Image (cartoon, rainbow, N blue to C red):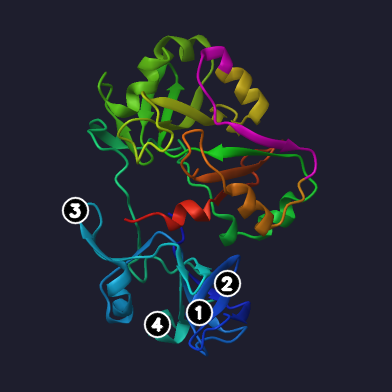
Amino acid sequence: MRALATVQTVIDISPIEDSDFLELAQVMGWRCVVNKGQFQPGQSAVYFEVDSFLPIDDRFEFLRKSSYRNNDDNGEGFRIRTMRLRGQLSQGLLLPLSDFPELAGAAIGDDVTEQLNVMKWYIPETASGSGTIIGSRPHGIPASDEIRIQSAPDLLTELAGRPYYITTKMDGTSCIVYCIDGKIGCCSRNNEIKDETDALYWDPVYRYGLKEKLPALGRNVVLTGELCGPGIQKNKLRLPEYVWYVFDWKEWNSDCYIPYQQMLAECNGIGVPVVPLEEQGESFAYNQDELLTKATGKYPSGLHKEGIVVRDSQYPHKISFKVLNNEALLKEKD
């Protein structure tokens, strides 16, 4: 489960021009607008990431006007999202550790998501039925949930000087297709879906003929991609029909993810699209701000793209992270 609420150290405090009441706090690679004088560098705090959904609690009531939500998908609570305050980008919520006596003894870096009853904000991914759930995603089949670089800035140092590639982050719903010991299966991010021709998550199997093509490979594989098209999210790509963009190919028996160029060749061989490649290089040298700039831009439709994914070319899942487009995040309404 993603660590949505963690104990962190305030790295730096900087002023906000023309503001008498607000300033900017840095935690990990994130920056949050906070009340002036609320924090000092080196102070311990609880950081709630973007997409956190906080429970009804007196300590969060100040968020009611800007962040209160109540719907069938998430229930009642407060959604944390990217905002712009006094001209500054604010991503996440920072509160003093002293506000949470139940966290006494917590250390820097501790995940306190469950202790504080924080959930991930869920945006319904489809406007229509997605298929019949027949169980949880089978054990061992990985879910896709790249970490945001602001939450793991040390990855920039780990990747420095190494061969890398950058792909476009497509805006759809995660869809997994596997072929293991002759069985073809499909999963959403968390659940296995029944084989039905009108099930959304089985569309790639029938669209690309994978019931025949995957067993013909003669080995066990798990493919994960972003399914995009009408009724999925807001169809920012403006696609007239579904397209499945593969971004992970796992050789099941060896427990190995194959590099992008090999994945491209394999997918071309079975007629399946892959996520667009934006850049490939032999020596990674970007800092966080440069990557945030690269994450901006638009899809061919003219709408803001979701961002980019950066990976180690030799070992795609050893070092891997996403960089989201802040302009797109700011336009989110729900």
Asked if residue 281 is among those painted magenta in the image, a careful observer would answer: yes
Separation (CA) of disc 1 from disc 4: 10 Å
Q: Residue furthest left?
A: 72
Please identify, in this view, whether the residue under mark 4 or under mark 3 is nearer the observer.
3
User: Magenta residues, as a range?
Assistant: 268-283
Please identify, in this view, whether the residue under mark 2 or under mark 1 is nearer the observer.
2
Residue placed under numbered mark 4 in the picture: 100
10 Å crowding of disc 2: few (<14), some (14-19), many (20+): many
Mark 1 and mark 4 lie on one chain; the one further toward the N terminus is 1
Closer to the camera in the image, 177 or 238 = 238
Q: Amino acid at mark 2?
A: Val
Residue placed under numbered mark 2 in the picture: 27
The mark found on residue 72 in the picture is 3
The mark found on residue 290 in the picture is none
- Viewed as shown, does residue 330 lie left or right of 320? left
Separation (CA) of disc 2 from disc 4: 18 Å
Q: Amino acid at mark 3?
A: Asp
Closer to the camera in the image, 247 or 103 = 247
In the structure shown, which secondary structural element does the residue marked by tag 2 occupy? Answer: strand
The answer, for residue 28, to whether it is visible in the render is yes
Quadrant location, the C terminus: bottom left
Q: Where 17 sits versus 249, above or below? A: below
Residue placed under numbered mark 1 in the picture: 45
